[in-house]
Image (cartoon, rainbow, N blue to C red):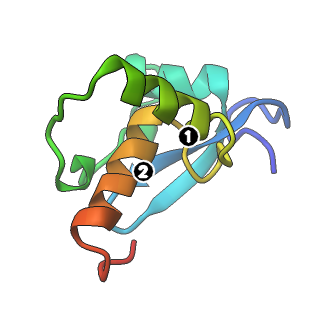
């Protein structure tokens, strides 16, 4: 696998093009950040972004630290961001029969 933009095989992450259909492309960390934070790559803008039905939650510092520690052990291609990881896990807890 290589970054769709620059071709590197270092620090790769999945970038969602469509969250509902789970359509992704592989980007390096640099270009993934640019795809989200700039208009440099308009063809890579995500559609159907829904945060998995979770708008916001409040958690205490200890739980946050434990989530970060657990996230650090996970596959970054499956869970490219901590927010993605937490949202997906909460979705699984709330509605376990739904599969992406």
Query: Quadrant of residue 97 in the image?
Result: bottom left
Location of residue 79 in the rendering, given as x and y in whole percent from the top left corner: 55, 47
Tell me which label, 2 or 1, sits earlier in the chain. 2
Query: Quadrant of residue 70 in the image?
Result: top right
Q: Is residue 43 above or below residue 94?
A: above
Extreme residue in the front direction: 62
Q: Nearer the viewer, mark 2 or mark 1?
A: 1
Q: Nearer the viewer, residue 4 or 80?
A: 80
SS state under label 1: loop
Drawn side of residue 12 relative to residue 78, left or right? right
Q: Nearer the viewer, residue 9 or 88?
A: 88
Location of residue 54 in the rendering, given as x and y in whole percent from the top left corner: 18, 47
Residue appearing at x 37%, y 38% in the figure: 45
Give the numbered dot on residue 17: 2
Residue appearing at x 52%, y 22% in the figure: 33
SS state under label 2: strand
Q: Nearer the viewer, residue 72 or 10?
A: 72
Drawn side of residue 73 relative to residue 97, left or right? right
Location of residue 1 in the rendering, given as x and y in whole percent from the top left corner: 81, 51
Q: Quadrant of the C terminus?
A: bottom left
Q: Which residue is mark 1?
A: 80
Residue appearing at x 83%, y 31% in the figure: 10
């Amino acid at each position: 696998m290589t970054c769709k933009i620059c071709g590197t095989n270092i620090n790769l992450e999945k970038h969602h093009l469509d969250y509902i259909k789970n359509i992704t492309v592989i980007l390096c960390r640099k270009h993934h950040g640019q795809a989200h934070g700039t208009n440099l790559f308009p063809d890579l803008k995500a559609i159907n972004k829904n945060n998995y039905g979770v708008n916001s939650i409040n958690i205490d510092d200890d739980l946050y630290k434990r989530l970060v520690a657990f996230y650090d052990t996970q596959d970054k291609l499956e869970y490219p961001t901590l927010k993605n990881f937490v949202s997906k896990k909460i979705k699984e807890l709330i509605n376990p029969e739904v599969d992406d």
